[in-house]
């Protein structure tokens, strides 16, 4: 077993990226994700890579687009207001089918908001975020180890689908320190018959999102749609305490992490509560939840916002005679396990007894 | 019969969509001739922009990636850093480069990115139907300056070539025109030099072309040439500003 090292969540992201072969990083400072560019600036040169501190988040995402167009593994990271600025580029990357990894160590909004943790970017992340009918794969880690592991996976998924992949964390996941076990990345091969290298001995290649001829854009959008549909095979989620559960509590990211302690407390007191944690937020594990709803009728979403993922939960199980409750908390403070225990106990008592 | 004139290899043999009297076709050809001259067709990655020049990829027989409006210098930065041995150029209009893309061009130039930027200045937003550009001249009527550009209201026509020359990171900046044979020959020479700056690894090169837009100027192609000579060149002087 490799020895564990003690690192910050943001550093784990940067380490995972470099291990996965990311050699180009473009970014712009914003709290609470600065350890990512700082780590890249220090370590990428040793790997023969390139770090650029761009003039803006807009420039960074477009540098990512350019590097991605050549087939290079590249990443940018930011936090909520900066991710808003990147949406133009993300939309173009989806339209032009250019891979890249984008990390959102989200903070709170709207506007300048604050630097406290929030899950207010769930809609932006899972519904495309920019203009046009597109999606990005969204991975939601809940630990420093997962920051590392899922970042490596993000590069594979981006290349596999020729699509940007988003990692959605928050200030907690970026700033907290935990033991991390590094592991070697196993290189996978993906088709490279589209990358721009100069038209040497082959037809010229073009990466674009503009389609003006009759029917062309319709076909292009259907092609993208089929790709987004195919992404369902990448769905990941975690369940705990499902045995005999009468209430399933659903949360992602840092909230799921806190909720795990609360569910343990509930089980210790004999309450039959199970936990469901989506790891891919897009594609969302609708089918898995639907299957659970064949035996369990009570669900509850807990989020660090005023209600976003709960809509997906309702799409999955909010039919028939199921109950979907919600506990939301706008940014500003982090709930303790005790507080979440209190909330799930309230719902458990209302629905089960 | 001996053929003495042909399309450059770097251009695909199809008709341009540009309006009569537009200079994009000439500028496309000059760029393509340079690509041929230095044997770069198989080494080139072009970055197209948004505006009339977006269809560059239909005409150039090279790899191309399309950039969002104004972002071509940032995209080109990513391309060139990832593939330093390729020849990388952007081709942008005045709305794209001097309005929405001001930050990207200034910082790409100042980082000294080893890219070549072709900037086409026709003092108007062409594709969207003739609105004011940052380069629109004093008094010039456009659809959004129907009473003429008023400096008190709209500021001044921006001189990108001089502005970029001021940056310590830029290596070569120049302004040319293709309104007559003499200017065209000079333009070709200067464009060659801009290409060599990148080929020799010297740094960032930038060539501004004064270009006609008879459609949006509401002029005949011939009147448009007179306007370039009499109105534009006195305000936007031709020649190498930096890095001869």
Image (spheres, coloured by chain):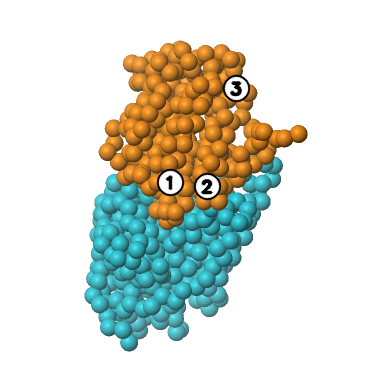
Chain colours: A cyan, B orange
Q: Residue at x 27, y 52 (%)?
A: A30
Discs 2, 1 touching: Cβ within 8 Å: yes
Q: Mark 2 or 3 closer to N-term?
A: 3
The percent coordinates of residue A112 (x first, y second) are 29, 46
Quarter occupied by the C terminus of chain B:
top left
Q: Secondary structure at mark 3?
A: loop
Residue wearing tag 1: B199
Residue wearing tag 3: B21
Task: Choose top left, top right, bottom left or bottom right for residue B139.
Answer: top left
Q: Nearer the viewer, residue A316 or A204?
A: A204
Q: Is residue A4 visible?
A: yes
Compared to residue B131, the image places residue A127 above or below, namely below
What is the spatial separation of the Cα atoms under label 3 and label 1, in whole angstroms? 32 Å
Q: Is residue A180 left or right of residue A299?
A: left
Q: Residue at x 52, y 39 (%)?
A: B34
Q: Mark 3 or 1 closer to N-term?
A: 3
Q: Secondary structure at mark 1?
A: helix
Chain letter behind tag 2:
B
Which residue is at the far front? B2
Q: Is residue A260 left or right of residue A308?
A: left
Discs 3, 1 touching: Cβ within 8 Å: no
Q: Secondary structure at mark 2?
A: loop
């Amino acid at each position: 077993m490799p020895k564990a090292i003690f690192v910050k969540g943001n550093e784990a992201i940067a380490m995972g990226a470099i291990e996965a072969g990311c050699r180009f990083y473009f970014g712009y400072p914003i709290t609470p994700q600065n350890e990512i560019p700082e780590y890249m600036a220090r370590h990428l040169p040793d790997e023969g890579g390139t770090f650029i501190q761009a003039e803006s988040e807009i420039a960074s995402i477009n540098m990512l687009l350019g590097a991605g167009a050549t087939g290079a593994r590249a990443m940018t990271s930011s936090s909520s207001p900066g991710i808003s600025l990147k949406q133009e580029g993300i939309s173009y990357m989806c339209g032009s089918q250019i891979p890249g990894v984008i990390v959102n160590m989200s903070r709170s909004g709207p506007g300048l908001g604050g630097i406290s943790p929030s899950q207010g970017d769930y809609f932006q992340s899972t519904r495309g975020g920019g203009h046009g009918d597109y999606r990005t794969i969204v991975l939601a880690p809940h630990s420093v180890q997962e920051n590392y592991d899922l970042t490596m996976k993000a590069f594979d998924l981006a290349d596999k689908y020729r699509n940007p992949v988003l990692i959605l964390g928050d200030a907690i996941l970026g700033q907290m320190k935990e033991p991390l076990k590094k592991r070697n990345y196993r290189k996978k091969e993906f088709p490279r018959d589209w990358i721009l290298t100069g038209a040497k001995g082959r037809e010229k290649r073009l990466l674009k999102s503009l389609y003006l001829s009759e029917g062309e854009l319709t076909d292009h959008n259907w092609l993208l749609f089929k790709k987004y549909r195919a992404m369902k095979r990448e769905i990941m989620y975690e369940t705990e305490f499902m045995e005999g559960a009468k209430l399933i509590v659903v949360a992602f990211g840092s909230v799921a992490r806190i909720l795990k302690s609360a569910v343990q407390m509930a089980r210790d007191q004999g309450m039959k509560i199970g936990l469901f944690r989506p790891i891919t937020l897009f594609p969302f594990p609708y089918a898995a939840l639907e299957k659970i709803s064949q035996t369990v009728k009570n669900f509850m979403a807990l989020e660090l916002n005023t209600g976003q993922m709960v809509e997906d939960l309702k799409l999955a199980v909010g039919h028939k005679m199921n109950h979907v409750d919600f506990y939301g908390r706008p940014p500003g403070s982090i709930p303790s396990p005790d507080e979440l225990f209190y909330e799930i106990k309230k719902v458990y008592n209302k629905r089960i007894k | 019969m001996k053929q003495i004139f042909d399309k450059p290899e770097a251009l695909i043999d199809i008709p341009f969509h540009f309006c009569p009297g537009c200079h994009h076709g000439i500028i496309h050809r000059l760029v393509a001739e340079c690509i041929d001259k230095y044997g770069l067709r198989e080494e080139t990655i072009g970055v197209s922009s948004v505006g009339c020049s977006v269809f560059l990829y239909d005409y150039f027989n090279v790899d191309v990636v399309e950039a969002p409006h104004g972002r071509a210098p940032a995209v080109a930065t990513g391309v060139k850093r990832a593939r330093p041995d390729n020849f990388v150029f952007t081709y942008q209009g005045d709305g794209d480069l001097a309005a929405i893309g001001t930050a990207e061009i200034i910082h790409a130039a100042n980082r000294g990115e080893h890219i070549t930027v072709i900037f086409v200045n026709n003092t108007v937003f062409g594709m969207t139907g003739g609105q004011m550009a940052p380069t629109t001249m004093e008094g010039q009527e456009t659809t959004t300056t129907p009473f003429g550009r008023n400096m008190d209201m709209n500021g001044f026509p921006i001189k990108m070539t001089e502005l970029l020359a001021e940056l310590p990171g830029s290596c070569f900046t120049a302004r040319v025109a293709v309104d007559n044979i003499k200017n065209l020959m000079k333009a070709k020479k200067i464009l060659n030099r801009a290409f060599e700056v990148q080929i020799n690894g010297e740094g960032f090169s930038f060539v501004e072309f004064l270009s006609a837009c008879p459609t949006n100027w509401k002029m005949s192609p011939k009147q448009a040439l007179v306007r370039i000579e009499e109105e534009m060149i006195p305000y936007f002087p031709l020649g190498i500003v930096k890095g001869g």
